[in-house]
Amino acid sequence: MKKVFFAVAMIAAAATAGASEAPLWLRNPAISPDGRTIAFTYRGDIFTVGAGGGQARQITTNPAYDTAPVWSPDGRSIAFASDRDGSMDVFIVPATGGQPVKLTTHSAAETPVAFLTPDTLLFSAAVMPAQADIQFPSSLFPQTYKVSVKGGRPQMYTSLAMEQISVNPVDGSILYTDKKGYEDPLRKHHTSSITRDIWLADHNGRAGFKKLTSSTGEDRNAVWTPDGRSYYFLSERDGGSFNVYKATPGSSEVKRITDHAKHPVRSLSVASDGTLCYSYDGELWTVKEGAAPSKVKVAIAADYNEKPLVAQVRRSGATDLAVSPSGKEVAFILHGDVYVTSIEYATTRRVTDTPQQERDLSFSADGRSIVYSAERGDTWGIYRSSIKRPEEKLFTYATEIEEEPLVADGRTSFQPAYSPDGKEVAFLRDRTELCVINLADKKIRTVLDGKYNYSYSDGDVTYRWSPDSRWFLVDYIGHGGWNNKDVALVKADGSGEVTNLTESGYTDGNAKWVLGGKAMIWESDRAGYRSHGSWGSESDTYIMFFDPEAWDRFRLSKEELALLEEAEKDSKDKADDSVKSDKKDKKGKKDADKNSEKADKVEALKFDLDGRRDRVARLTGNSSRMGDAHLSKKGDKLYYCAAFEDGYDLWERDLKEGTVRKLAKGVGGFMNPGKDEKQGVCGSPRQSDRGESQRRQDQGYRFRGRLQLSSGYGTSVYIQSRMASGQRQVL
């Protein structure tokens, strides 16, 4: 088992009473009912501080993550969520500190919301929706439960997804923020049909429903005024960032309370004296209606729980894998930085060390450069790191590595890929426009207009260079919508020559050149469980031939192919004998050398596209949730990652014998067989390295087992040695 050793340094500045800089990222503030104290979260613990500022008191000290403080109506206790016992549970602790008492025990994540009465706490958890609930049954839409502050069995309060509940201090009616979809709650300037609104309901949350806001943007986090007649809330309704507003049920008049311009206001709460508290730009603020907001100056003196330097041996977390042309190195992304490791030894080299993220790796043809996407400044650009010294060949042992920007013009550019001849780099601009930059003159040309693709998430538009660096296989919306893509053949010179190859009416993608460019394999859901309702599908791997002779050869039986190969071998042996004879004189030797050089050059591909639909074959025996696939150079074996029952496995199908066998269990994601197919990499990179033409349709899609496949989740990296042997090493 191969291990990669390296140190990951995480350095944080310790905040002390005498520190000159105020602590930042004070989250989830909640002001006490009497308006004198603010509870908040800082570095995974609960703190309190006077509403006028000063030295903060640490209420929880457990190494676990504590968050979401909620004051009891009498101000004597604070409820909060903590994962100290595994999953998030609800605890309650005296406001002055002490031993927390656990109130909930379910394995689902539970978060306190509000006190319904002095003795009853409401909390949110995705446990079991009611039978009559008409919302989509998903953990994205949790229920609200109630539990006694003395503990006991929780009871369902409502199955309707309610966020940020506020209980009226006079009649007990509630305000809540609805949840119509799965949009990120931290998204700014969101306008769509699922933006949040504020609703009114009775004390039991079962009747008296009335929608109070209906702006095109987000309205959320409503809190009752102390007299229970009006409410304050957060909104982006004036086109800027989130600010505090005031409204009254039954009235259309809305009054703006704060005027913060740059950052959003978060976590609004109110005291019985009308003091509002919220977080802004990582700090605590208070305001009273008619007065100017005031920043709460907080000082924190707390022990530093984390080590300033953590040395780790990592066996997981690698993404965006790329194998060098020599097969001696693997580049990968870990924690947003580029690393290169030796396949043969345990040596690993860090290539980038930036606070921004890097991803989407591609080696140059000579293995001396790597291009990648990098988030520098306000947007993504294309950057290249190269080995500086000519005598050094490998990144792992290079003493000097030089980085330079290739495309950094202020427009979003990512997902770069070197051309096979190493002269150009392709990339996506503005998410869907396929462009190419010539490395000699740095000129950029558009190969495929962005209108022919739709990007739902990063990396869901795939393309691949042809072996002769003159064409692309690329996702293409020719007929239908974004969830029924085709595969197109596009000329790389920018002339706009496009041929829709598949035109199936279903989802086709993840196309790859095979057999030296004489054919392509791709993934399609045309024969399996189909995505008619955009809720996922099962796929197969197909092959399409651009060369009739290659198609005829592919269809030969094992016996027929063996006879043909024997005849070809005899013919080649005779040709070799003739060349050896010619080498007796000087002229013959020069001719042989010239012929040898000519053979090394990649010939321009020629396509017979008229009969391509008659030269299509299904390579997988049954449909499944596909990861990636690779066809051997001879075209006789298909290697693919698929999940048939529980988790993804690596399979081999012998196309001549018609047999299928499992090579490795718990392996999924992308595949790179290496130059000579004797050593390859199987892993789970970001979507940009997988042909994920329809993965985004299945939000619950995951790899189980030792590899997990999802955007943003890390994976182990498996080195598959001699793919047929089934042996593997962990990188």
Image (spheres, rainbow, N blue to C red):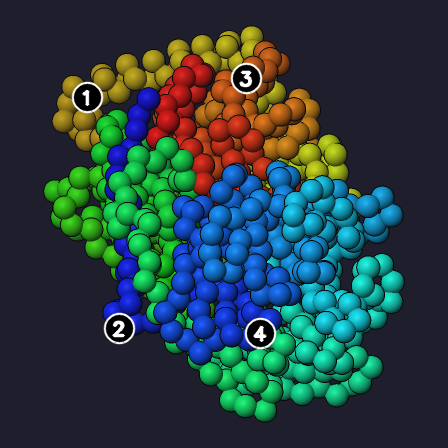
Label 2's element? loop
Label 3's element? strand
Q: Mark 2 belongs to which amino acid? A: Ser
How busy is the neighbourhood of tag 3: few (under 14 within 10 Å), some, or many (20 plus)?
some
633 in relation to 6, above or below: above
Q: CA distance from mark 4 to mark 1?
A: 100 Å
Q: Is residue 24 left or right of residue 475?
A: left
At horizontal 40% and vertical 35% (from top left) the residue drawn is 316
In the rendered image, residue 622, in percent from the top left (x then y), is placed at 68, 24
Among numbered discs 2 and 1, the one appearing first in the sequence: 2
Q: CA distance from mark 1 to mark 3?
A: 49 Å
Labelled pair 4, 1 in contact (Cβ < 8 Å): no
In the rendered image, residue 149, in percent from the top left (x then y), is placed at 65, 51
Residue holding disc 2: 20
543 in relation to 552, above or below: below
Name the mark nearer the viewer: 1 or 3: 3
Residue 34 is marked as 4
